[in-house]
Image (cartoon, rainbow, N blue to C red):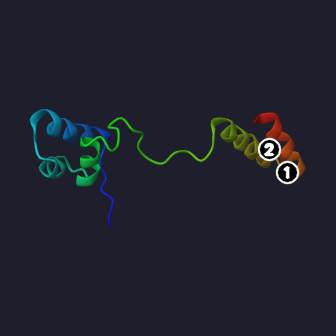
Amino acid sequence: MKCKAYSREMMMSAYKAVKDDHLPVDRAAIMYGVPKQTLRDRVLNKVKISSRWGKDSLFTHEEELLVSHLEGLAQVGYGINRSQLKFLQVIWL
């Protein structure tokens, strides 16, 4: 199955057309170019309309800072071993 590319604005417009103008979900999905089931889930409150889109980050902000620091060390030729990494992890996180 192919994923359709659509924006938050397109989804919000389709959602408002269904809720405010009483347009059928199937017709609104076609008109605004959004997936029918995704729109239906939001209209039926199975998924919040304000829910985050896209995948969540695998790292916390602190972990990203640590990675950035480690990359900086690597760029100047300073490698670290596992015990040093664990020590940095305790300090940073």
Callout 1, which amino acid? Gly
Callout 2, which amino acid? Leu
Q: What residue sits 23% from the left and 53% below the top?
A: 36
The location of residue 88, given as percent across then percent down, is 83, 40
Q: Residues within 10 Å of mark 2 (few under 14, many from 20)?
A: few
What SS does tag 1 mark?
loop
Q: Is residue 58 above or below residue 22?
A: below
Decide if residue 24 is on the left or right side of residue 55.
Answer: left
Instruction: Work out whether residue 34 can be spotted.
Output: yes
The location of residue 52, given as percent across then percent down, is 42, 39
What label sits on residue 73 in the rendered view?
2
Decide if residue 38 is on the left or right side of residue 65.
Answer: left
The location of residue 12, given as percent across then percent down, is 25, 37
Residue placed most toward the observer, 47 or 68: 47
Q: Which residue is mark 1?
A: 79
What SS does tag 2 mark?
helix
Cα distance between the residues tagged 1 and 2: 7 Å
Residue placed most toward the observer, 63 or 70: 63
Q: What residue sits 14% from the left and 48% below the top?
A: 31
* The image quarter in which residue 7 lies: top left
Residue placed most toward the observer, 51 or 9: 51
Q: Quadrant of the C terminus?
A: top right
Determine contact: label 1, label 2, CB under 8 Å. yes
Decide if residue 40 is on the left or right side of residue 28.
Answer: right
Q: What residue sits 18% from the left and 46% below the top?
A: 32
